[in-house]
Image: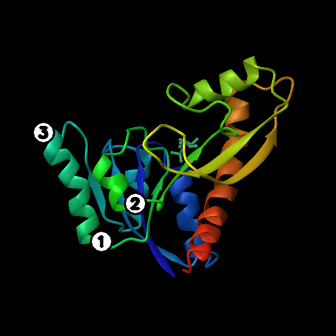
Amino acid sequence: MFNFGVMASGAGSNFQALLAQIEAKRLNAVCSFLIVNNKNCGAAQIAKAKDIPVYHISSVTHPDPLEYEQAFLDVLKKHEIDFLVLAGYMKKLTNSLLMHLKNRILNIHPSLLPKFGGQGFYGRRVHEAVIEANQAWSGATVHLVSGEYDNGLILGQSMVPVFINDTPDSLAARVLVAEHNLYWKTLRDYAASLGY
Ligand code: GRF
Protein backbone atom coordinates (compact mmCIF):
# COMPACT_ATOMS: atom_id res chain seq x y z
CA MET A 1 0.00 0.00 0.00
CA PHE A 2 1.35 3.42 -0.88
CA ASN A 3 0.17 7.03 -1.03
CA PHE A 4 0.40 9.36 -3.95
CA GLY A 5 -0.52 12.89 -4.84
CA VAL A 6 -1.61 13.96 -8.32
CA MET A 7 -0.93 17.14 -10.26
CA ALA A 8 -3.21 17.87 -13.20
CA SER A 9 -4.69 20.80 -15.06
CA GLY A 10 -6.78 19.22 -17.79
CA ALA A 11 -9.85 17.08 -18.24
CA GLY A 12 -8.55 14.60 -15.69
CA SER A 13 -9.29 11.35 -17.50
CA ASN A 14 -5.96 9.82 -16.42
CA PHE A 15 -6.62 10.92 -12.84
CA GLN A 16 -10.07 9.36 -13.00
CA ALA A 17 -8.65 6.14 -14.47
CA LEU A 18 -6.21 5.85 -11.55
CA LEU A 19 -9.00 6.39 -9.02
CA ALA A 20 -11.10 3.75 -10.79
CA GLN A 21 -8.31 1.19 -10.39
CA ILE A 22 -8.09 1.99 -6.67
CA GLU A 23 -11.85 1.59 -6.32
CA ALA A 24 -11.70 -1.71 -8.21
CA LYS A 25 -8.98 -2.81 -5.73
CA ARG A 26 -6.52 -3.46 -8.51
CA LEU A 27 -4.26 -0.65 -7.34
CA ASN A 28 -3.47 -0.94 -3.64
CA ALA A 29 -2.92 2.75 -3.01
CA VAL A 30 -4.45 5.94 -1.63
CA CYS A 31 -4.67 9.21 -3.53
CA SER A 32 -4.02 11.90 -0.91
CA PHE A 33 -4.49 15.13 -2.85
CA LEU A 34 -4.75 16.85 -6.20
CA ILE A 35 -2.81 19.98 -7.10
CA VAL A 36 -4.20 21.98 -10.00
CA ASN A 37 -2.90 24.92 -11.92
CA ASN A 38 -6.40 25.86 -13.04
CA LYS A 39 -9.11 25.61 -10.41
CA ASN A 40 -11.92 25.02 -12.90
CA CYS A 41 -10.31 22.10 -14.70
CA GLY A 42 -12.06 18.76 -15.05
CA ALA A 43 -9.58 17.07 -12.73
CA ALA A 44 -10.57 19.45 -9.88
CA GLN A 45 -14.26 18.57 -10.36
CA ILE A 46 -13.43 14.85 -10.21
CA ALA A 47 -11.45 15.29 -6.98
CA LYS A 48 -14.19 17.35 -5.34
CA ALA A 49 -16.78 14.71 -6.16
CA LYS A 50 -14.57 12.10 -4.44
CA ASP A 51 -13.69 14.29 -1.43
CA ILE A 52 -10.01 14.36 -2.35
CA PRO A 53 -8.38 17.59 -1.15
CA VAL A 54 -7.68 19.99 -4.03
CA TYR A 55 -4.98 22.67 -3.91
CA HIS A 56 -4.93 25.43 -6.47
CA ILE A 57 -1.37 26.65 -6.94
CA SER A 58 -0.49 28.94 -9.82
CA SER A 59 1.37 32.14 -10.56
CA VAL A 60 -1.99 33.89 -10.06
CA THR A 61 -2.63 32.45 -6.59
CA HIS A 62 1.07 32.85 -5.66
CA PRO A 63 2.66 35.65 -7.73
CA ASP A 64 5.79 35.67 -5.59
CA PRO A 65 8.13 32.89 -6.88
CA LEU A 66 9.31 31.96 -3.39
CA GLU A 67 5.76 31.70 -2.08
CA TYR A 68 4.83 29.72 -5.19
CA GLU A 69 7.61 27.24 -4.49
CA GLN A 70 6.73 27.08 -0.80
CA ALA A 71 3.07 26.36 -1.54
CA PHE A 72 3.99 22.98 -3.08
CA LEU A 73 6.25 22.10 -0.17
CA ASP A 74 3.46 22.99 2.28
CA VAL A 75 1.17 20.46 0.60
CA LEU A 76 3.88 17.81 0.82
CA LYS A 77 4.42 18.60 4.48
CA LYS A 78 0.73 18.19 5.18
CA HIS A 79 0.32 14.91 3.27
CA GLU A 80 3.13 12.43 3.38
CA ILE A 81 3.26 10.80 -0.02
CA ASP A 82 5.39 8.10 -1.58
CA PHE A 83 4.87 9.24 -5.19
CA LEU A 84 3.75 12.28 -7.11
CA VAL A 85 1.87 11.50 -10.29
CA LEU A 86 1.58 14.08 -13.07
CA ALA A 87 -1.48 13.59 -15.22
CA GLY A 88 -1.79 16.40 -17.72
CA TYR A 89 0.16 18.98 -15.73
CA MET A 90 1.75 21.45 -18.11
CA LYS A 91 3.99 23.58 -15.91
CA LYS A 92 7.61 22.86 -15.09
CA LEU A 93 8.10 21.65 -11.53
CA THR A 94 10.11 23.73 -9.09
CA ASN A 95 13.62 22.50 -8.23
CA SER A 96 12.79 22.02 -4.57
CA LEU A 97 9.87 19.75 -5.47
CA LEU A 98 12.10 17.71 -7.77
CA MET A 99 14.73 17.38 -5.08
CA HIS A 100 12.20 16.54 -2.38
CA LEU A 101 10.75 13.62 -4.37
CA LYS A 102 13.75 12.51 -6.40
CA ASN A 103 12.87 9.47 -8.57
CA ARG A 104 9.35 9.49 -7.15
CA ILE A 105 7.64 11.78 -9.65
CA LEU A 106 6.01 10.13 -12.65
CA ASN A 107 4.58 11.68 -15.80
CA ILE A 108 2.60 10.35 -18.73
CA HIS A 109 3.16 11.55 -22.27
CA PRO A 110 1.03 10.70 -25.32
CA SER A 111 3.81 9.44 -27.62
CA LEU A 112 6.50 6.81 -27.72
CA LEU A 113 9.26 8.87 -26.12
CA PRO A 114 11.90 9.90 -26.96
CA LYS A 115 10.00 10.51 -30.19
CA PHE A 116 7.67 13.52 -30.22
CA GLY A 117 8.60 14.78 -26.78
CA GLY A 118 10.20 17.90 -25.36
CA GLN A 119 9.18 21.53 -25.34
CA GLY A 120 6.28 22.30 -27.65
CA PHE A 121 5.10 18.68 -27.88
CA TYR A 122 1.90 18.64 -25.90
CA GLY A 123 -1.77 17.94 -26.54
CA ARG A 124 -2.93 17.85 -30.13
CA ARG A 125 0.48 18.97 -31.44
CA VAL A 126 1.98 15.57 -30.54
CA HIS A 127 -0.56 13.66 -32.61
CA GLU A 128 -0.34 16.10 -35.54
CA ALA A 129 3.42 15.58 -35.63
CA VAL A 130 3.08 11.78 -35.50
CA ILE A 131 0.68 11.84 -38.47
CA GLU A 132 2.80 14.34 -40.40
CA ALA A 133 5.82 12.09 -39.91
CA ASN A 134 3.90 9.07 -41.31
CA GLN A 135 4.54 6.95 -38.25
CA ALA A 136 3.06 3.44 -38.28
CA TRP A 137 2.93 3.37 -34.48
CA SER A 138 2.32 5.79 -31.66
CA GLY A 139 1.49 5.20 -28.01
CA ALA A 140 1.95 6.34 -24.45
CA THR A 141 4.99 6.61 -22.20
CA VAL A 142 5.25 6.78 -18.42
CA HIS A 143 8.57 8.18 -17.27
CA LEU A 144 10.27 9.62 -14.23
CA VAL A 145 10.36 13.40 -14.17
CA SER A 146 13.71 15.10 -14.42
CA GLY A 147 14.31 18.83 -14.75
CA GLU A 148 13.66 18.81 -18.51
CA TYR A 149 10.40 18.26 -20.38
CA ASP A 150 9.66 14.61 -21.18
CA ASN A 151 13.16 13.55 -20.26
CA GLY A 152 13.76 11.01 -17.53
CA LEU A 153 13.94 7.26 -17.15
CA ILE A 154 11.20 5.50 -19.12
CA LEU A 155 9.21 3.18 -16.84
CA GLY A 156 6.63 1.87 -19.28
CA GLN A 157 5.29 2.21 -22.80
CA SER A 158 2.24 1.02 -24.67
CA MET A 159 1.94 1.06 -28.47
CA VAL A 160 -1.08 1.81 -30.63
CA PRO A 161 -1.28 1.66 -34.44
CA VAL A 162 -1.63 4.81 -36.53
CA PHE A 163 -4.23 4.29 -39.28
CA ILE A 164 -4.01 5.84 -42.72
CA ASN A 165 -7.21 7.87 -42.21
CA ASP A 166 -6.37 8.99 -38.66
CA THR A 167 -6.91 12.60 -37.65
CA PRO A 168 -5.12 14.07 -34.63
CA ASP A 169 -8.37 13.64 -32.69
CA SER A 170 -8.92 10.00 -33.61
CA LEU A 171 -5.30 9.16 -32.82
CA ALA A 172 -5.46 11.10 -29.53
CA ALA A 173 -8.54 9.12 -28.49
CA ARG A 174 -6.79 5.78 -29.19
CA VAL A 175 -3.65 6.86 -27.33
CA LEU A 176 -5.72 8.07 -24.37
CA VAL A 177 -7.22 4.60 -23.89
CA ALA A 178 -3.67 3.21 -23.89
CA GLU A 179 -2.67 5.84 -21.30
CA HIS A 180 -5.49 4.80 -18.98
CA ASN A 181 -4.42 1.15 -19.20
CA LEU A 182 -0.73 1.92 -18.82
CA TYR A 183 -0.50 4.45 -16.00
CA TRP A 184 -1.86 2.43 -13.08
CA LYS A 185 0.08 -0.71 -14.04
CA THR A 186 3.33 1.20 -14.35
CA LEU A 187 2.74 2.97 -11.04
CA ARG A 188 1.91 -0.36 -9.38
CA ASP A 189 5.01 -2.08 -10.80
CA TYR A 190 7.36 0.82 -10.06
CA ALA A 191 6.08 1.03 -6.48
CA ALA A 192 6.55 -2.74 -6.11
CA SER A 193 10.10 -2.46 -7.43
CA LEU A 194 10.84 -0.01 -4.60
CA GLY A 195 9.38 -2.38 -2.02
CA TYR A 196 5.82 -0.99 -1.61
C1 GRF B 1 -2.75 13.16 -21.62
O1 GRF B 1 -2.74 12.96 -22.99
C2 GRF B 1 -1.37 13.04 -21.05
O2 GRF B 1 -0.57 12.14 -21.75
C3 GRF B 1 -0.82 14.43 -21.20
O3 GRF B 1 -1.92 15.27 -20.95
C4 GRF B 1 -3.13 14.59 -21.26
C5 GRF B 1 -4.02 14.67 -20.05
O4 GRF B 1 -5.30 14.18 -20.31
N1 GRF B 1 0.32 14.64 -20.35
P1 GRF B 1 -6.31 13.99 -19.11
O5 GRF B 1 -6.47 15.34 -18.43
O6 GRF B 1 -5.77 12.95 -18.19
O7 GRF B 1 -7.61 13.56 -19.76
Of residues 128 and 49, the one drawn nearer to the viewer in this rendering: 128
- Residue 189 appears at what percent x and percent y? 65, 70
Report the residue marked by disc 3: 64
* Vertical relation: 165 (above or below) 26: above
Tell me the distance, in whole angstroms, between the alpha carbons under discs 1 and 3.
23 Å
Of residues 37 and 45, the one drawn nearer to the viewer in this rendering: 37
Q: Nearer the viewer, mark 3 or mark 2?
A: 3
- Residue 163 appears at what percent x and percent y? 85, 30
- Residue 42 appears at what percent x and percent y? 43, 47
60 sits to left or right of 125: left
Work out which quarter of the rendered image holds the C terminus and state it. Answer: bottom right
- Residue 177 appears at what percent x and percent y? 70, 49
Report the residue marked by disc 2: 47
Element type where label 1 sits in the image: loop
Write down which quadrant ligand 1 falls in: top right
Residue pictured at 26% horizontal, 55% vertical:
72
Residue pictured at 56% horizontal, 74% vertical:
194
Nearest to N terminus: mark 1 or mark 2 = 2
Which image quarter: residue 59?
A: top left
* Vertical relation: 3 (above or below) 153: below
Tell me the distance, in whole angstroms, between the alpha carbons under discs 3 and 2.
27 Å
196 sits to left or right of 136: left
Name which residue type carries label 3.
Asp
Name which residue type carries label 2.
Ala
Residue pictured at 39% horizontal, 53% vertical:
45
The answer to whether mark 3 is within 8 Å of ligand 1 is no
Q: Residues within 10 Å of mark 2 (few under 14, many from 20)?
A: many
40 sits to left or right of 125: left
Report the disc number at residue 87. none
What colour scheme governs how the chains and residues are painted in the rendered image of this protein?
rainbow
Report the disc number at residue 79. 1
Nearest to N terminus: mark 3 or mark 2 = 2
